[in-house]
Image (spheres, rainbow, N blue to C red):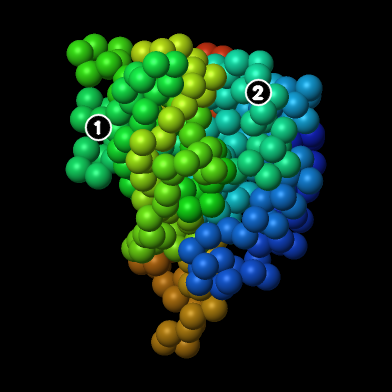
Amino acid sequence: MDRTIYTEDHEAFRQSCAAFLERAVQPHAEEHVSNKALPRDFWTSAGAEGFLGLEIPEEFGGSEAGDFRFNAVFAEELSKINAALASCMSIHADITAPYIVQLGSQEQKERWLPGVVTGENLLAIGMTEPGGGSDLAALKTNAVRDGDQWVINGSKTFITNGYSADLIVTAVRTDPAKGAKGITLFGIEATDPGFSRGRKLDKVGQEEADTSELFFENIRLGDDRVIGELGGGFIAMMQKLPQERLICAVSNVAHAKQILLETIQYCHDRKAFGQSIGSLQHNKFLLAELVTQIEVAEAYVDQAVLAHSEGKLSATDAAKTKWWSS
């Protein structure tokens, strides 16, 4: 089926993305797997090509495209290469950067966003914790007020980009008595005294994805590191869920589509009983079902992308899109 949500501009951007990834990623795939991370020169190359600032205002070096379809195109091309690449890039540009753009003070934006655009300030988001996972109600990382500073202690785990990140937007409990309203977001820099990283975590898949443990031991920060309102972290994270869920759905479908294309090629090349296995009737039925399922999912996700680009995607619809595509 023809896709109707993308214009000539989007398709031209897609070609630019594909050309960059073919040049910057594919020749180094084995190296990325062995290092369990993407090298910094990849990030700066992506920044130089303009791929990291699609949602960042021009005054901070971004392109401020104002159209989420460009983000979706980039995510699709990343996912064709591998899911790990899409995860790392999305965490940086689609999931974490919007917290600074939409909630950060002018000083914070000036301090952090130019490097986000160039790839010199790599982002991660610190939510998941040992034991509690991503259940914010079980959040244990805490900040205690001491004069005009906050003293932060705790840990995070399974943090994508964690081993390489320069800035971690971190969920911290600032008032245990207020439940969800006692969670605040802090911008913790890798150079802050008391910050350390654990090991790069081994995973079943997405080996290229930089995933690690993070530790905070008596990190002292002022109010200038609070992102958004004090106690507003939970609400902020809930408000950002639609885009986070949607970009996962986009990547899921694109990755599945690429796997299907490789499967069809294998069925064409593999011979049995004097013919390609793809010509066997039973296998034709199976492939037809897979093609149909993926095209249905793609059409569903496309409409969600269009709705989000117009500011109309609800958290519920985003959740359904992610579930259906997973």
Question: What percent of the width, then of the height, locates residue 55?
Answer: 66, 27
Q: In 3D space, how far apart are the residues under numbered discs 1 and 2 (Cα atoms)?
A: 28 Å
**Which three-letter amino acid code belongs to the residue tagged 1?**
Lys
Residue 268 shows up from this direction: no
The residue positioned farthest toward the bottom in the image shown: 274
Question: Does 314 sit above or below residue 321?
Answer: above
> SS at mark 2?
helix
Residue shown at 21%/30% (left/top)? 138
The reply to whether callout 1 and callout 2 are in contact (CB within 8 Å) is no
- Amino acid marked by disc 2: Lys
For label 1, the residue is 140
Q: Return the mark for residue 109.
A: 2
Asked whether the viewer can see residue 61, the reply is: yes
Residue at image point 62% right, 23% down: 108
Query: Which is more toward the observer, 149 or 57?
Result: 149
Quick one: quadrant of the C terminus?
Answer: top left
Secondary structure under tag 1 reads loop
User: In the rendered view, would you say 204 is above or below 55?
Assistant: below
The percent coordinates of residue 43 (x first, y second) are 67, 51
Q: Quadrant of the N terminus?
A: top right
**Relative to 280, does residue 285 appear above or below in the rendering?**
above
Residue ID at (76%, 40%): 50
Nearest the eye: 210 or 222: 222
- Total numbered badges shown on the rendered structure: 2
